[in-house]
Image: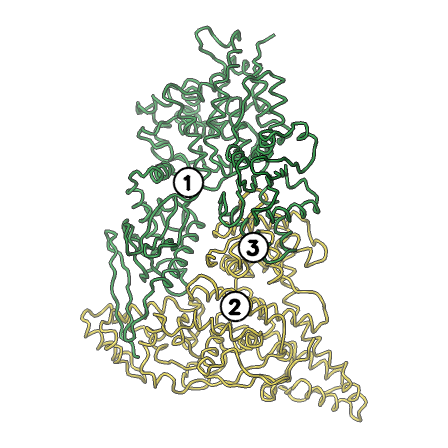
Chain colours: A yellow, B green
Amino acid sequence: MNQPIGAPKQYRDDVYVWVDEAIWGHRLYNDQTPWLVFLEFMAIFRSRQAEGVALNESRQDGAHENFTYEVPRLIPLRQLIFNNPYIRHVEETQDVDSNRWQSWLESFATDDDFGYLRDRFISFARLARVVEFFQTTAIEPHRQRRWSSRFLFPYGPNCLYADLPANMNGASDRRFFARSGELLYLMLNRSGKGPEIAKLISEKILRQDGTWNRVASALLPDESRINANPVSSRIGYLPYAERPEYEALAETWMRLLKLDLPGEALLDPLMRLSALHMLLYMLRRANEEICDPREPRFVLEIASPRKTTLFGLSTENLDANRMLSTRAVRAHVESAKTDRQWDLALGARVPADAVLAYLKERFAWRLEDGPPSGDPDTIFANLQEYAEKRHQRHVGKVHLEWARQIGLVVSRPGVGKWYSPDDSLLKALVMCTVDEGREEYHRFLGKLYDQFRLVIGASEAERAYGVLPTDQNAFTQNTQRLEQRLRTLGLLRRLSDDCAYVENPFRRRS
Amino acid sequence: MSHVNQLISFLRHYGPISASDNMYDELIQAEVERYGIDPAIHISPAYLQKVQKNFGSEEPRNVILTGTAGDGKTYHCRCVWGHFGGDPEQWEAGKKILSLWLPVSEKMLKIVKDLSELTQSEKDGLLADLAQAVTDKSQENVFLVAANDGQLLASWRDWSDTQGEEAHRVFKTVEDMLVEECTTSETLNLDLYNLSRLDASGHFEELVKQVVEHPKWSDCEGCELLKDDGSTTCPIRINRERLRGNSDGSVFRKRLGELMKLARSNHMHLPIRDLLLLGVNILLGDSQKRQILLTCKTAKNRAKKQDYHLTNPYANVFGLNLSERQRQQYQIFTTLEAFGIGRETDNKFDNVLIYGTYNDSDIYKEFVGKDLYYGASAYESYLRDYLEGERENIEEFMHALSRQRQRLFFSLPSEVLLDPWCLTVYQSSGKFLEFVEGLASGADVLRIRELLVRGLNRTFCGMMIDEGTELYLASAGGDGRGRIASLLNYQLSTKKSRRDLYLDFMLASDQATPCLKIIDPLRKEDPEVDSFNLQLTHFEYLVRVASGSLPSSFSRQCNEDFLDFKLRLIKRLDDLIGEPPSASEVNLQALTVSREGRVIPENIQIKVGV
């Protein structure tokens, strides 16, 4: 395992203890759902694309990337779409177009003057339709977030903006754009395929000339006022310079971006699979910290009318995966004792003080509740407890939250939580894995394991566990249920008793 | 000693009671001789003529025969062997690969009876030679290989993984041929015949005819159940008459043939071997516990006790004389059962069946009353109990009702007021067959085309559009999978044009499935922009949606298929004819639908800054 890059001092100074960040980076955060990770990434990309260096950031050997990116606020646009109940009301209570405009402009009092909309849209009804359109296609509409954290569907660069608190002109509070998107950006940057992917992104999903992107710009006032006072930020911290996870992530992006589909249809699968790759990254890093050489795995129980033996296995698997990050934190803190510094501190004149100083230095420990008292072991236990508690608050919840959001985990009150894929995830997996247009079914299952560690059938279970963890029949039926599911999604064709093919409907005809 | 007809004993061997269900053709030879069945019952192997002609030509192509067990692959090979002078004893000797000299082309024909019999190293050797033969016409060997499709692809893929790029490309071509059902390749010296993708209806007709018209039926003379005037109470002979029909033909057989055609276009497989099994089961099926098939003796018992409800040929079509587990072993029964005949119904039919006697319905009299064995007599007692009686036998009544529906399905001629296809899951099957027929013969199918286009419009836009001549491709915004798509991307005509893109319907390469194609007349070399095969399920889906059903209620799979097609098509059209956007304004077309179902496009023009 290559050595991690040193963390920038200002970040270490910024946190109460530097453990989660040392293991996975600064930082992963449960409240930032996979869609928001994706949006943050896109915002960063756009900013860097304007400088011509998107995903091609320079980095000195052994050093971390060091750049600042800027994200516009686009307050007028968001006011219009997400903080504007007057449009509906005016449309319903007034008939004459000019009256409508007048009423609305009066009631919609903000810092900006929206008169330019009248010149551009001419009819009030048109404006209403367009606003409605953006509202109905907004991201994650069911989440009850503050209106300043609601996001448009990213039709293009003009739809990207920063997450802001209610006071939109102040500093960003990093409540929802919590830097997980920065980690995604850094991973792709370090994958070796950054420039290629950047080109594809610009051509397919972040086009200036997209229809709805231009309509969004019509909703904004003049250019000069759009980019005033952007939110500025330094890029976060990702510990390792090279990892196979980055390359796997890049491979997924390349495959999806090359499909025969309009750009907008690619966003959902990209969002889901990026989060899946990041979950795998978390698990693998955790395994490294606890020195477990095994590969992570996800045992999927395909939805069945009756409970199967795989249910128990999958539930256990999820529990173990969730616990893994906490175990990693414990091991990481524990590793302080193996350092020579620890022994030196123990041998000092006042061991307690020396140990405290050592731990404070090593983990950037800022004592929230004042200095702990007691002997070195008590102090150490204090640190352990603190690190774990902090971990449980946010980073420890990432696995379950993200896995649920991408459709990998099902949660039923009274029954439990386990790994079971939903249709959108299955479709995304087929779109990404079946890159030659079609794949024989069992080879497809093998590829799902190779690329994403998904265990559905018996041979993958054997590869993951060494021996079959439960009876073969349960796995066989699992694959049969998946086959049926794929067939209802139009993704599988059975040719005969021993021959079935998974088909990707979006592969370019060669 | 009661009278026994040897033909019956012989036929029983091909019903669903055989312990071993392979070695079909070897068995026929032995049994035919034992029972003295002359002429022997045979199926003309579908591709035999073609294959023989191929190997007799000056430049023979390599041939691969695929299919599942019982499709006749080995039989084809044996006939080819014999045709070119191979020694039958050598065939029996058991060698896996046989060689034969072809004088006309001066090549060595190598026949592989069954790929799965070869060891791994033999397979590797064979595939290496075969790959060479298909890429290089000058090779001195030419091959005839019989293999299961799954086996063939797995072996070839595994072998090509150890070779280079070229071998992998060859494998991909073969895989394409099999999956796309192409029989011949333009790039490789190879023909591939998939024996499980045949039109079973023709074979079935051939088989049934041989069975019901066989001279050995005359051996029934002298039996107590057969009177001098030809009338009979023997259930076997009664069933035979049903299959024979009258001078106008047999609706029973016709309907069976149509079911098979439909199964084929829906990619539902009917093994050839199962066809004889079906015929025998219809004739001899016996629902008495553990009997399964009639013998001459048990037939007499049924006749004496008038237990005709046990020998119902219409129920036998679906293997209802077998236990559920036994039934599921035979592909043909699961395929036919998928049509839902007996379960599906509508008010018109049930009205006739349940109230027909009280309404003095002509249809009832003609089609239920007149059938003395399987119609009213088998059914009326349950009906009376249900309508007037104690209702103690509700379950029995439901079974009897179900069997009447099955019988009606197979006995209603198409011209009557009631459409027999309403008794199946695929209610538009009649239209489907008409459509395929029309596309093949060039007849006028305009009404069906309009119906399909209407269904497409409703699916693509998610709104109750009533338009059958223009196709609207609209998107939903966001990631494109929303149900209501009201932003128009493209509008395509269904009329042929010399300049503009249009939508057309034609038959796919298998000549049995209708296919929807988008044509760009300006691209001479490759006018087809995109295409979509309309299997029976898709056709049914479109007809139902056009008639008012919600797009995701009949079949989620079809809905997904069509939405994927729409997204892909929009992307291709964007690449082909997408116009660069105007710099100063954005033009959108929003669709709304009037109460009459007319599409009203509304032009939205928005001025944008530079």
Q: Up-down: is A105 above or below B555?
A: below
Q: Secondary structure at mark 3?
A: helix
Residue A253 circle label: 2
Q: Tell me the subunit letter for badge 3.
A: B
Tag 2 near tag 1, CB within 8 Å? no
Q: Up-down: is B72 above or below B566?
A: above
Q: Secondary structure at mark 2?
A: helix
The answer to which of B609 and A360 lies nearer the viewer is B609
How far apart, in angstroms, are the residues tagged by discs 3 and 1?
A: 28 Å
Percent x, y of residue B15: 57, 26
Q: Up-down: is B123 above or below A373?
A: above
Labels 3, 2: one chain: no
Percent x, y of residue B195: 53, 37
Circle 1: residue type? Gln
Q: Identify the residue under disc 1.
A: B511
Is residue A309 visible in this depiction of the protein?
A: yes
Image-based side of A14 in relation to B419, left or right: right
How far apart, in angstroms, are the residues tagged by discs 2 and 1?
A: 40 Å
Q: Tell me the subunit letter for badge 2.
A: A
The answer to which of B152 and B209 lies nearer the viewer is B152
Outermost residue toward the bottom in this view: A349
Identify the residue at horizontal 59%, vertical 15% (top origin).
B36
Q: Up-down: is A259 above or below B406?
A: below
Quadrant assignment, res A5: bottom right
Circle 3: residue type? Arg
Circle 2: residue type? Trp
Image-based side of A123 in relation to B544, left or right: left
Percent x, y of residue B489: 32, 61
Labels 2, 1: one chain: no
Q: Identify the residue under disc 3.
A: B169
Q: Give whichever of discs 3 and 1 has the lower sequence position.
A: 3
Quadrant assignment, res B23: top right
